[in-house]
C-alpha cells in the first residue's frame, strides 16, 4: 500500500508559538502541501475551551470548523485534513460535527497508554461520526512494555484506522524503531496501518521515519523544516527528497515555502530544531521541557544541564 | 572486536577554516579526546608543500612532526594519533619518518577509486615504515560499481588494516550503508576492519554511522559538533551518547569543549552543518562545493539553487 505523508506543521509547530500563525502562513502552507502532493494536512488541536482560554492561543489550538473552512473552502482536493484530539484536553462529543457536516477528514486521538480506554472510546465515537481515525500513543519510551502491549491489544480491536508509533522524547534509535514497528504491525489486521511520528532530539527523526517506513509503517508524519516542539520533527524536505524518485511528491513547493516563511520565523526569533540540550534529554529519555526552557533562557552551560538531568 | 572512535575534527574541520586553529583549541581538543576515551585523534593532512603554499594554511594542513609533538609530547597515552595522506597531494616518501622516530601511529590514505594502485602502494609503504594504515576510498556514491569492486579487490590483498567506506557527498541512506558495509566486509579477512566516514547533508551522518556499526564496521569517524566540510560529519556527542551505556566513553568532556570552543567558532562566523543547500547536493549526489559557496554568499533562493543543480 502506498505511503501517506501527513504534514503536522501547524499542530506540532503550534507548540512552539502557541498556534499564532498568520492566515497567510496557513494559506500558503495549505497550498504548498497541495502542490507537493502531501496526503494529509493537520490543522491543529481540537482543544476544550473550558480548559484552555481562547485568548491565550491562536485559533489552531481549537480548529473551529469555520476557521478551517476560511482557509480551505470545501477542500475539493485529493488532500485530506486532520485535527488532533488530545485525551483529557478535549470535549469531542460537544465540539465535533458529524463528518457529513465537516470539512475535516481524520481525527487523530493522542493519548498516553494509561488512558487507552478513553482513547479507544473516542476513536470509536469519531468513527461512528464518519471520520477516519488514528490513535497516537505518546511517550512509549517511558512506558512499561507490558502497558504498551496492553494498549496495543486494546487498539487492535477498536475502530481506529491507524495506530501511531510516537517517539515523544526523541529517545529511540533506528533499531528500536525496527522492533517497535514490527510489534505495532503485529496488532494490525489488513484494515489497519501503522504510523510514525518522530522527534529530532538525536538527529534521528528522518532516519527513524525511513526505518519505520522500510519496516512497514504507512503513515509518515513530517513538518516543514522540522518546525515542532523542541528539537522538532522529521523534515518534510528530507522525506520528500528521499521518496521523490519513486513517487509523485514534489520538493520544490516546500523549498519555496521555506524561503518565504520559515526563514522569517527564524528571523523573528522562534527557536526549534536540534541542539545539545535536546540531545541530552533525548539521550536520557526525558521530556524536552527542561531543554526548551534552558535554550529559551539563553543558557549554554551544557555540563551543568547534563548534571541536572542525571539528578532529576 | 571493540569499536574504535576516530576524531577527525582538525582534519575535516580544517577544510572549513583552512586549518587555522589556535594552539589552545588543539591542546584542549587533544585533552578532550583523552578524557572522553576516544581511540584515535587525527591531526590533519600530510600535504605536499610543493603543491600547497605553507602560508596559505594553518599548520595542520602539513602536520609536521614537531608541530604534533608541541601538542602531545611523546603522547604517552592509550590514544593513537593519525594523519591523512591524500593521493596526488602528498609526498609521503619525502615527508614521513619511520614509525620509530614519529609520534604518529596511523596513516590514513585518501584516494579515489581511479588512483587505487597508488593508494595501495602508499599504504604498503607506510606499513613497511611501521605504521597502522587505512585506505579511504572517496566519492563512491559517484563511482561505477565495477570500479568500486575493483578498488576493494585491490585493497583486500594490500597491507592496509582498515578499509573506509566514505560518503563524501552525504548521498547515502541507511539501507545503502547496510549493503555497502556488507560488501566492504566481504573483502576483509580477520586482520582487516571496515571504517565509516559519513557526512550530514541529509541529517543522516549519525544514523549512517550507527547503521555501519551495527553491520560490522569497527572504525567510526566523528567530529565535535559535526565540525567539517559543508554539512559536517557524525557528531562526537551523538555517537558517544548512543554508545556510552555499553562502554567507557565519557560525554562530559565533549560538552565542555563545545561550551568553550565550538560556540566561539560559530560566534566568529564559521559556517558548517546541515542546511537546505546541502540537502539538495546530497540528494542529487553532487559535491557540496556549490552549496558551500551558495551559503557563503548568503543566498537563500533554494528553488533557483535546486534548478541550477538539475541543469549542472
Image: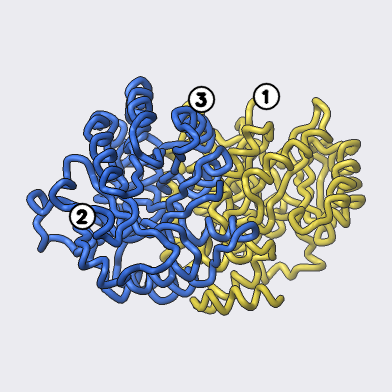
Chain colours: A yellow, B blue
Label 1 sits on residue: A1
Who's the residue at 57% across and 75% down the image? A294
For the question of whether residue B228 can be seen, the reply is yes
For marks 3 and 1 on the same chain, the one whose residue lies earlier in the sequence: 1
Do the residues at discs 3 and 2 belong to one chain? Answer: no
Residue B127 screen position, x and y as percent: 30, 43
Q: Secondary structure at mark 2?
A: loop
Q: Quadrant location of residue A292?
A: bottom right
Residue B249's x, y, as percent?
55, 63
Q: CA distance from mark 3 to mark 1?
A: 14 Å
Which of the 4 image quadrants contains residue B226? bottom left
Residue B124 falls left or right of residue A291: left
Relative placement, left or right, of A218 versus B140 is: right
The chain containing the residue under callout 3 comes to A
In the picture shown, does residue A282 fall above or below B183?
below
Where is B279 relative to B80, above or below? above
Q: What is the chain letter for disc 2?
A: B
Q: Residue at x 31, y 32 (%)?
A: B310
Tell me the residue at 54%/76% (across/down): A303
| Dot in front, 2 or 1 | 2
Residues tagged by mark 2 and mark 1 found on one chain of the structure: no
Is residue A249 visible to us here? no
Which residue sits furthest front?
A: B100
**Marks 3 and 1: same chain?**
yes
| Marks 3 and 2, how far apart at CA | 53 Å
State yes or no: discs 2 and 1 in contact (Cβ < 8 Å): no
Comparing B203 with B190, the one in front is: B190
Q: Residue A102: which quarter of the image?
A: top right
Chain of the residue under label 1: A
Give the residue number, with chain letter if any, for mark 2.
Answer: B97
Amino acid at each position: 500500500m502506498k505511503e501517506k505523508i501527513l504534514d503536522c506543521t501547524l499542530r506540532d509547530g503550534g507548540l512552539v508559538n502557541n498556534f499564532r500563525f498568520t492566515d497567510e502562513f496557513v494559506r500558503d502552507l495549505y497550498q504548498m502541501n497541495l502542490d507537493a502532493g502531501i496526503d494529509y494536512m493537520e490543522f491543529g488541536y481540537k482543544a476544550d475551551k473550558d480548559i484552555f482560554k481562547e485568548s491565550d492561543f491562536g485559533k489552531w489550538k481549537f480548529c473551529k470548523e469555520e476557521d478551517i473552512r476560511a482557509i480551505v473552502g470545501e477542500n475539493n482536493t485529493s488532500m485530506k485534513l486532520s485535527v488532533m484530539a488530545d485525551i483529557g484536553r478535549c470535549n469531542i462529543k460537544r465540539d465535533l460535527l458529524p463528518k457529513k457536516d465537516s470539512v475535516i477528514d481524520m481525527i487523530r486521538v493522542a493519548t498516553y497508554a494509561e488512558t487507552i480506554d478513553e482513547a479507544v472510546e473516542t476513536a470509536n465515537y469519531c468513527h461512528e461520526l464518519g471520520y477516519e481515525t488514528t490513535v497516537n500513543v505518546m511517550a512509549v519510551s517511558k512506558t512499561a512494555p507490558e502497558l504498551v502491549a496492553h494498549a496495543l491489544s486494546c487498539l487492535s480491536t477498536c475502530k481506529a484506522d491507524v495506530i501511531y508509533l510516537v517517539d515523544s522524547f526523541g529517545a529511540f534509535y533506528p533499531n528500536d524503531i525496527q522492533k517497535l514497528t514490527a510489534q505495532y504491525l503485529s496488532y494490525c489486521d489488513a484494515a489497519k496501518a501503522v504510523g510514525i511520528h518522530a522527534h529530532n532530539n538525536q538527529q534521528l527523526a528522518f532516519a527513524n521515519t525511513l526505518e519505520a517506513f522500510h519496516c512497514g509503517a504507512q503513515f509518515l508524519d513530517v513538518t516543514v523544516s522540522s518546525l515542532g516542539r523542541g528539537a522538532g520533527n522529521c523534515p518534510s524536505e528530507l522525506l520528500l527528497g528521499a521518496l521523490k524518485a519513486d513517487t509523485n511528491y514534489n520538493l520544490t513547493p516546500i523549498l519555496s515555502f521555506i524561503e518565504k516563511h520559515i526563514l522569517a520565523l527564524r528571523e523573528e526569533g522562534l527557536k526549534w530544531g536540534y541542539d545539545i540540550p535536546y540531545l541530552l534529554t533525548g539521550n536520557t529519555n526525558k521530556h524536552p521541557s527542561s531543554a526548551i526552557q534552558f535554550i529559551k533562557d539563553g543558557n549554554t552551560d551544557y555540563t551543568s544541564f547534563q548534571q541536572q538531568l542525571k539528578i532529576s
